[in-house]
Amino acid sequence: MVFNLFKKDKSLHDLLTHKMREALDTERELSKALPRMADAASDPALKKGFSSRLEQTRNQAGRLERAFESLGERPNADSDYVVRSLIDEGEEFSSIDNPAVRDAGLISGARHIEDHEILMYQTMADWANEMGHNEAAKLFSETLKEEQETKKKLDHLAPDIYSEAHEVKEQKTE
Ligand SMILES: [Fe+2]
């Protein structure tokens, strides 16, 4: 069910549960996409990064389910169109022939997804704190910390991957 924007009678609680449903869709869709991203990646560190994120992503979905429970809400997911379009783009990057250029596309998408997740969990933690939903806020903060760690690792890895991809282009234009 998509958040009904035409219903104007909304509370902050409604916004929070809406965001949680999108976040649940994000983690579930990523659990499906990460094994494909790991297969497509060629750089060993990037490949390992994608496969190790799978377990973490499943745990994050579990944390969201617990947060729904703590609010007395059912853990239903709503399509998160942002992450779904980023995953689609990742599928396109996966079909690039050159492994270095393919990796550059994949890691750019992964960083974009992390930024999106960081913003979602930060927003949910802020809203849950504001409303005194302490257990949910704690769960969101735990995941937020993991997403920030992942982002840091990707940021660290990206320059080398981009420079390898650039060398490919230089060779072709000689
Ligand atoms: Fe996540």
Image (cartoon, rainbow, N blue to C red):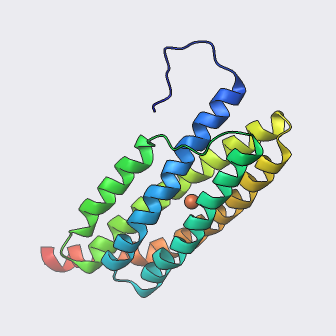
- Whole-percent x, y for residue 83 in the image: 43, 49
Ligand 1 quadrant?
A: bottom right
The residue located at (37%, 71%) in the rendering is 37
Nearest the camera: 112 or 170? Answer: 112
- Whole-percent x, y for residue 40 in the image: 31, 76
The residue located at (71%, 29%) in the rendering is 13
> Residue 126 vs residue 49: left or right?
right
Q: How many marks?
A: 0
- Quarter of the image containing the C terminus? bottom left
Residue that protrudes farthest toward the bottom in the picture: 44
Above or below: residue 170 compared with residue 59: below
- Residue 41 visible in the shown view: yes
Above or below: residue 144 compared with residue 163: above
The residue located at (54%, 68%) in the rendering is 155
Above or below: residue 94 compared with residue 137: below
Residue 16 location, quadrant? top right
- Residue 165 visible in the shown view: no
> Residue 103 vs residue 111: left or right?
left
> Residue 160 vs residue 130: left or right?
left
- Whole-percent x, y for residue 129 in the image: 82, 40
The residue located at (56%, 48%) in the rendering is 23
Nearest the camera: 102 or 32? Answer: 32
